[in-house]
Structures are given as C-alpha cells and as structure tokens.
Amino acid sequence: MNSRSLLLNAYVYAVLAFVLVPIIIILPMAFSDTNYLTFPPEGFTLHWFGDFFGNSRWMKALRFSAEIAALTALVTTVVGTMACYALVRGAGRIGALFQGLLIGPIVVPHIALAVALYLFFQKTGLSGTVAGYVFAHSVIAMPFVVFTVAAALTSVDPALEDAAMSCGATRFTAFRLVTLPLILPNVLSGGLFAFIISFDEPVIAFFLAGIRDKTLPRMMFDNIEQNLTPVIPAIAVLLTCLSILVLVGAALLRRASVRTTAAPAQD
Amino acid sequence: MLDGRTADGAAISLRGLEKRFGSLAAVDDVSIDIESGEFLALLGPSGSGKSTILMSLAGFERPTKGQILIDGVDCTPLPPHKRNIGMVFQHYTLFPHLSVVENVAFPLKMRKVAKSERIRRAEAALKTVRLEGYGQRAPKQLSGGQQQRVALARAIVYNPRVLLMDEPLSALDKNLREEMQLEIKRLHSELGITVVFVTHDQGEALTMADRVAILKEGRLQQISPARELYERPANLFAASFIGEMNQIPVDYDGGVVRLGGGQAIALPQEALVQPVPPGKAVLAVRPERVRLVDATSADALPVRLRDVVYAGAGTLVIGDLADGTEIRARIPSADSADLRAGTTLHMGFPPGAMLLYGGGAA
C-alpha cells in the first residue's frame, strides 16, 4: 500500500466517522437511566421507549405523521411515475424544462420553500390540514421518486409497449401489463423514500403545524424546547431504525428490478 | 397447425401514402396493392421510408396523406390495437417478466380468451415455430433466434390475416438468419397469411418474397417479382441497388450506342426497359453476363486487366475499358487460370445481357 492510498483511506474513514459519530452517540443516550440527556449514559433502562409508546400525545403525533407520510408516498408514486413516463418517453423541450424544475425542491432551501408554502396556505386555508402537509411533502419528495423511477424506465425498451399494442393492448393496458411490472420495484422504492422523507421532515412541519395536529418531528422540537428528556434520543433511535429498514428495503427492491430487466442471453 | 385459421390473408392497398416530418417527406406518394396471401418485401437503404410504411400499416405512424385499406376497409385512422395485425419487431420484444408461453398467450388475453384455451393455443403456436416444450422458460434463457421465433409465435397465435415484420432477422448471425428465412417462408406457405417484410438485405428480399418493392428517399422505384427485378430493373437505382452492375457511359443515337473508346454496339429492342431518348445514356451489364471473347469477335472490347480475384468457384476480373471506365466480369474459375493483371484481353456482352438507361450514371 503506497502513501497516497493510505491518505485516501484515512480521509474516507474520517468522513465516515464524521457522519456516523452523532448517530452512535445518540444511541446509548436513549437508554440512560437519568431524567436528563447525558453522555456517557448512566445505568440502563427501556423506560423512555415505554414513555414514548405510552404517551397519547406522542402516539397521536406518530399516527398523524404516518398518515401524512403514507399519503405522500401514494401521491408521489402515482404522480411521479406519470411525470416520469412523460419525461422519459415524451419528446420535446417541455420535458427538459420540467426536469429542470423538478430539481428545484432539492436545491431551494427547505426554509424558503416552507415560508412560501406558509404564505400560500394561509390564503388557501390548507394550513394545518392533512391535504396541506401531503401537498408540501409531495413537492420535496417528488424529485426522488421521479429520478428513482426514471432510472428503471430508461432501461425498459419502448418497443415492448409497441409490441403489446400490436398484440391488441391499448396504450394504457400496455403500460399496466408490461412497463409497470418492469419498473414496479423502483416505483415502490421511490414510494419508500417519499414515505421516509415526509416522516422525518421538520422544517415545513414547523411552519404548517396547527394547534392540535402536530407531526412527530414537530412534537420533538416542542419537547426539546420544554424539557429535554431521553425520550428524544429514544425516538431518534426508532427513526434511525426505520430509515435503515427503508434503505435496505429499497436496495432489495432495486436488486429485484435488475434481475427482471437484465440483458437477454446472446447466441 | 393453428386452430380456426382463416384460409387466406388479407388484401392490402396503400393509396397515395405520404408521411411528412416537417419539410422532409419520409414516404412520398407510395401506392402498392398487395394481394391476399402475398409475401411482399420492402427493400431500400436506411432513410428510404420502408420502415415508415410498415409502421403506418401497423398504426404506429399516422400518414399525413393517403389511405391504407385492409380487405377494402379503410384502416388509416385506427390505432394499432384495433387493426388485428401480427407484428414482429427488429429488436427482441418479448416481455421479460412473463414466461415464453405467457408471452405467446398475451394477444389471446387481450382478446379475452379463457385461460385454459389461451395456454392450449399458445402451446400450439410454439409447436408451429418448433419451440415445443420451451413454454415455461424465461425469454432471456433463450438464444436470439429462439426469441424471434417466440415473437413470431406471439404474432400469429390469434390468426391475424396480416403479418408485418420489421427487419426481424437483422440482429441474428448469418447462419441463423438463413435458417430463419426458410422458417418464415415455410410458415407463410403453411398459414396463407399476407406478409409484409421490411429489410435492407437484398439477398433476404430476393430469397423470401413473392414481390419486392424497392424504395429510395420515400419513393417507390420498382415493384416486381425477384427475377424481373434482377434481370430487368426499372431504373439505374434499382439496377445498382440489387446485385452488382457495370455502368458504362455511352452516347445513344436511337439504335446504336457508342462507347467512350469509340466502339459501337447495336442494341436489341429489349435492352430498353423504358423509352430512352437519344443522347447521353448508361449501358448496364451484370458482371456474370460479361464474356471473355477472341480479339477477332465482332463485339470484342479491349480491356486492360487491373485485378484478378480468385474466389473458389468463380473469379472476379476487374479491368478498364479504353476510355478508363471500370468493368467487372465474374467468370468460372476454370476459365481464368492464365489471366494476369496488366495484360489486355477482350470482353463481349451477349445481346440479351445489355440494358440501356437514359441520363448519367447512378
């Protein structure tokens, strides 16, 4: 091993450590047998997890977040897949324009988007409603769904749909029976991403929250302001586990998609 | 054999077909009548409009002008799924997530045939293309040739009266291609279906088709049976596109042609496929019709040999006429043993081998 690759290795491990250390530090704090956050933790208890699951306000926020995340996943997969189909299969400049606009929610700071949506929702009465959250979260999750689906759709030969139509299928049936099954793993994986993006989303939720209905990240902020107990790292642990599950699920789905669309054998 | 097949294919009539993309006419006023049960090849270089005509027949392209009649019914505005036409594409278009038999049964599913009946007919179609027992495999487990045969089975399983093929063999290697050509011909005669076959391979067109339509830049050049196309091409493009053709610039006075070197040759009347006005013209002769003759022969043209290319049964002799025009002759190798590049010999054209076209060389 020469000195250059040694340096590179050191650099890579430093970056990994930088990314992972906060997560690794928060994990044991969730099990600390104290009323306040402390590191290193003292004692061991599952008390804070029980506190979370036993508290009706936390549970209400959890259900509310889950409902919004599920609806966001549904909306973005349906709308995102349709948009993706138009982008990949359609021709012309409008497609390129939309593709540019789609990157918008990624590059625009969420705080700017949140302020804009806040003002817009004040006028339209969407503030604090489920529809409002789903709309806002769909905007930020949409690019991830479109790009995930596009990766699969570009590898599906458009001639397959022509073949299906020559067999007597309408264009929609051809899409439903041929193209959709081939891109489904990526559609579902895009949906999982949308779910987790919405579920974790704190900034927009901060601006849109009504008095009664709060999402889980918003509740965590409120809790941090009032009394910082280890229930926060406990929730953080749960959210981290959920994220890992989703990432693993998405990876498995994409591996399945590679299997179905792999190149045919040559003679 | 497939069940309930209709005895014969549909008659197709293309009338004044035109397809414009902006200012470019991909297909320009093409009219073709295809008989019931005929095997027609559309032949041309890329950009000749042959695929656009096929796609218009299939319903994937909407012609800007003209009509497509199938058995006298105007199909021009119908979408692909309402045309009841079988189609085999250039690429492998089997559905990768379905098994072979599910692929073949797909058109029957679209026609709401009951499942057991679907499978039975799909298996029968697989038998027709000699892939019995391959039904449970995934498409990607098959070779390219097998995949195209499955695509063929899928295209004929619902007994369509027209089968369209868009260069279906172009992705296969040479041996497999020749085997598939015979397979498709056999199916054609067995099913009595009307076939329209697009290709850029002249050998394929001549081997397979009852008639060949030659296209160039969106226009129909000639539509004839293979023999007529080869022996009496309608114009210089058709003459040079199919096989090899010597093209010798001449002056024509209405009966006799005069070569650049001064020699005169009297032409028989049948040398003119179409009327040729006196003036500049091109004398066309297939290389295999050129003869080596004695210097004393009346039609002897002196040729300075440039190359003698031995190729087993035949030998290609390349030389220059007195005015420098290149001339090629294909002669049996048995007659070519003492030919040497750099020497001069004499060639002659039998009267039936000469064709005359007006204007300059193509």
Image (tube, rainbow, N blue to C red):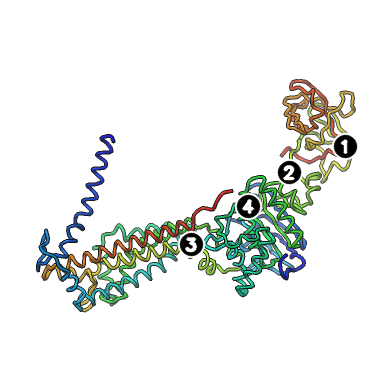
**Mark 3 highlights which residue?**
A182
* Contact between labelled residues 2 and 4, with CB atoms less than 8 Å apart: no
**Mark 2 highlights which residue?**
B242
Amino acid type at mark 1: Pro
Q: How far apart are marks 3 and 1 (CA)?
A: 63 Å
Q: Earlier in the sequence, mark 1 or mark 2?
A: 2
Q: Where is residue B173 in the image (x, y as percent from the top left)?
A: 63, 46
Figure disc tally: 4
Q: Which chain carries label 4?
A: B
* Contact between labelled residues 2 and 3, with CB atoms less than 8 Å apart: no
Q: How far apart are marks 4 and 2 (CA)?
A: 26 Å
Amino acid type at mark 4: Gly
Q: Is mark 2 on a helix, strand or loop?
A: loop
Residue B21 shows up from this direction: yes
Q: Where is residue A136 in the image (x, y as percent from the top left)?
A: 30, 69
Is the residue at mark 1 from the same chain as the one at mark 2?
A: yes
Of marks 1 and 4, the one in the foreground: 4
Q: Which mark is residue B145?
A: 4
Q: Residue B351 carries which label?
A: 1
Q: Residue A150 carries which label?
A: none
The residue shown at (21%, 51%) is: A18
